[in-house]
Image (cartoon, rainbow, N blue to C red):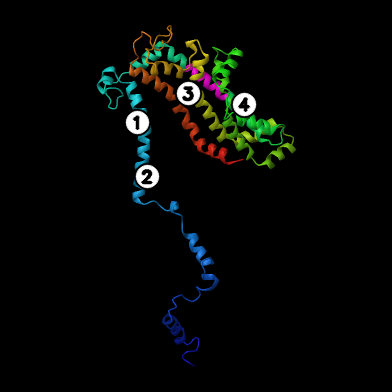
Amino acid sequence: MSVNAPGSGVSDQAVPSARRARGETREPGTGGWLGRSGGPRNRAKASRQRPAWAEAPTAVERVGKSLAVAGIVLVVLLPLYTVVLTSVSSDATINAAGGMVLIPGEITFSAYSAILSGGVVTRSILVSIGVTAVGTALSTVVSVLAAYGLSRTSTLLHRPILFLFIITMFFSAGMIPTYLVVSGLGLIDSYLALILPGAVSAFNILILRAFFMGVDSNILEAARIDGAGEFRILGRIILPMSTAVIAVIALFYGVGYWNAFFNAMLYLQDSAKWPLQMVLRSYVLEGVELPGSARTPAGVGSSQPAASLAVKMAIVVFALVPILLVYPFVQRHFTKGVIFGAIKG
């Protein structure tokens, strides 16, 4: 048998040597379609390479992320810490600190006692809670009904009504026409004046509409075939699937009602009906003394002495606590609801 015959062993060793001598470095089997850049082997190798953001972070990156998160948390919590600490500090500690207190000193709750014993802030808290609860419920129900109607593109006058909703996002009548409407309806010095003028937000309705339009139409058609009406479809099918986005919209409305003070400034003449934010503006921004429950809050230029910084910060704490207590229960729905409402439709 020849030494160069296939299978003799000498030929198998000589071929790679001859190939190297000619400058060919590619191994057998890597050429042709299998070895090309778009071939199966290279595609499999590329699929095994993860993107940069999917790689495990290095030690330096983990330390950097930890420092960035710690810095953000410090920026958020430091103002809250100073507000709460100043509200429970004595006047001597506040004077020694020259304003807002960063280092704890003499602790006293006299500011909270003055607020709760006066009755003005207590009554305003109850007003704010009532207006926020009623307004949020009313606005959420109206927005859900309007959004569901606008999400059914086959309904009568769908496009003109949707166009009117969109127009209100860019143009408004203004303060004077709105005041004339509220006055003409007899809502001056009424709690309804704090709710009805801003009861509906076109932006929130469009978010809900986009989500409702993303619901599979086959499910709705099956429900109609089974004899379900529109209200039953909304209550039994749409609402259970829309918990996240409705919770976010309710949070938007609740925060808006809780922080609103401009409507109270325009439409409420009786200071006993002021919400908490109006009292906060009067005593913190205008710097008047906190009166007793039988006295009317004084305005700028009053002869009353300025309210202490501890009392001002205590009122700020009362304004912040309800939202801080409610938000953690809605936070898990927040991102999910906003993303769904923005993408679907």
Q: Give the range drawn in magenta.
A: 125-137
Tell me if mark 4 has few (under 14), some (14-19) or many (20+) residues whose alpha carbon lies within 10 angstroms of its own. Answer: some
- Residue pointed to by mark 2: 65
Query: Magenta includes 245?
Result: no
Which residue lies at the image location 68% right of the left edge and 34% below the top edge? 159
Badge 1 is on which residue? 78
Q: In which quarter of the image is the C terminus?
A: top right
At 51% from the left edge and 66% from the top edge, which residue is drawn? 37
**Which mark is first along the chain, 4 or 3?**
4
User: Nearer the N terminus, badge 4 or badge 2?
Assistant: 2
Main SS, magenta residues: helix
Location of mark 3 (residue): 259
Q: In this view, does 317 lie to the left or right of 178?
A: left
Residue at the far left in the pictured view: 96
Query: Can residue 234 be spotted in the picture?
Result: no
Separation of residues labelled 4 and 1 (CA atoms): 39 Å
| Residue named by callout 4 | 142
First-in-chain label (1 vs 3): 1
Identify which amino acid the numbered label 4 is placed on.
Val
Question: Tag 2: Cα neighbours inside 10 Å, few (<14), some, or many (≥20)?
Answer: few
The residues bearing labels 2 and 3 have C-alpha atoms spaced at a distance of 34 Å
